[in-house]
Image (cartoon, rainbow, N blue to C red):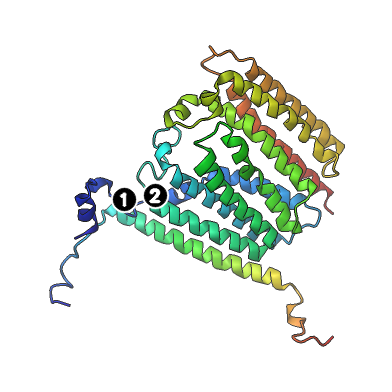
Amino acid sequence: MTETAVTEQPEGIRLSPEQRRRQRGRSVAIAVALFALVGLFYLLTIAKLGGGVLAAKILGSS
Amino acid sequence: MAYIERREAEGVAADTVPIHDGAAGDYVQLLKPRVMSLVVFTAFVGMVIAPTGINPIIGFVSLVAIAVGAGAAGALNMWYDADIDRVMARTARRPIPSGRVPAGDALVFGAWLGAGSVVFLGLAANYVAAGLLAFTILFYVFVYTAWLKRSTPQNIVIGGVAGALPPMIGWAAATGTVSMESFVLFLIIFLWTPPHSWALALYRSDDYARAGIPMLPVAKGLRATQIQMLAYSVPLAVVGVVPAFLGMASPAYGVVAAILGAAFVFLTWQVYRMPATDKEMRPARRLFAFSLLYLFLIFVMLLAERGFAMP
């Protein structure tokens, strides 16, 4: 890394304030969607396991 | 060389370079929320009136999967149709033609959501429902959007299969099978789609003609459209009553469904009598509005009767 690389603006696309705002909005939306997905998988797991999960026998003894 | 410079070298103006620029709302718009709401509603009815019932959590998760699957189909449709959306007044402001979302992003977004929703529904409910959802998405994208829409005036008739499947998916999510009852729900929406879509196409035919889409009024003219609308409305009115005979609904439902069906046929008859000189096409506008109410009321009645019948 050169000495100037840290302080100089990188080359490439520079986002306008509006573009930054939208980028932030997208990031928040992705975060919300991921949390929602985690919540759905959690709920689904609970529903699939059912109420008697703690009393379930692991091996086939009756 | 920076991305924009590279695109400029390819002859693309800097201000039209597609960078990831859309707001989160634009991606929501790609999912066609209004179509999605109809899909969720009809799938919900199919799920609730199924005789086996469904665990509320599994039902809710399944509905989310079905909604996302429908949205994915919408996003893929917008990706493929961006060129014709651009020239139609009704669709020109969609995220891709207006430049807010790059086409490639919509493709990736739709493909991942589609695949994810099918897997999710398979895990949540069963693989019959997941298979039906996969079929619906693939049919809508490949058969309707990519093939039929631009090639035949019967596009929305055959393509209507995709729109009619959600109640069957909901039913399958609850029961694990398809049955005569769920097929009747499918048939109601399938027969409803042509008169509903052609009513709209009649007073938007300029738009469709400009985009080169061979909608029936554009390709075959007013007379053929009027005849075919009537040809679907009459069987729709009959099939709308059938749930009362299959034990899915009470005789009271049958009576109201018959009245609604008669009103549907009457309004289609008024469209049938509409002269070619009628530029305002009020009968077609009236039928379009009523068709939405018709489908909503039929499904609400089925839902309500099932709700009241529950212990």
Residue indicated by mark 1: B18
Please tell me how crowded label 2 is: few (under 14), some (14-19), or many (20+) other residues with Cα within 10 Å: many
The image's mark for residue A16 is none
Q: Secondary structure at mark 1?
A: loop
Q: Residue at x 65, y 71 (%)?
A: A45
Whole-number angstrom distance, CA of label 2 to CA of label 1: 8 Å
The image's mark for residue B103 is 2
Is A50 located above or below residue B73 in the figure?
below
Q: Residue at x 58, y 24 (%)?
A: B285
Quarter that holds the N terminus of chain A: bottom left
First in sequence: mark 2 or mark 1? 1
Please tell me how crowded label 1 is: few (under 14), some (14-19), or many (20+) other residues with Cα within 10 Å: some
Three-letter residue code for mark 2? Ala
Label 2 in the same subunit as label 1: yes
What percent of the width, then of the height, locates residue A62?
Answer: 84, 85
Q: Secondary structure at mark 2?
A: helix
- Badge 2: chain ID: B
What percent of the width, then of the height, locates residue B11?
Answer: 22, 46
Labelled pair 2, 1 in contact (Cβ < 8 Å): yes
Is B11 located above or below residue B121 in the figure?
above
Q: Nearer the viewer, residue B248 or B108?
A: B108
Q: Residue at x 53, y 49 (%)?
A: B73
Three-letter residue code for mark 1? Pro
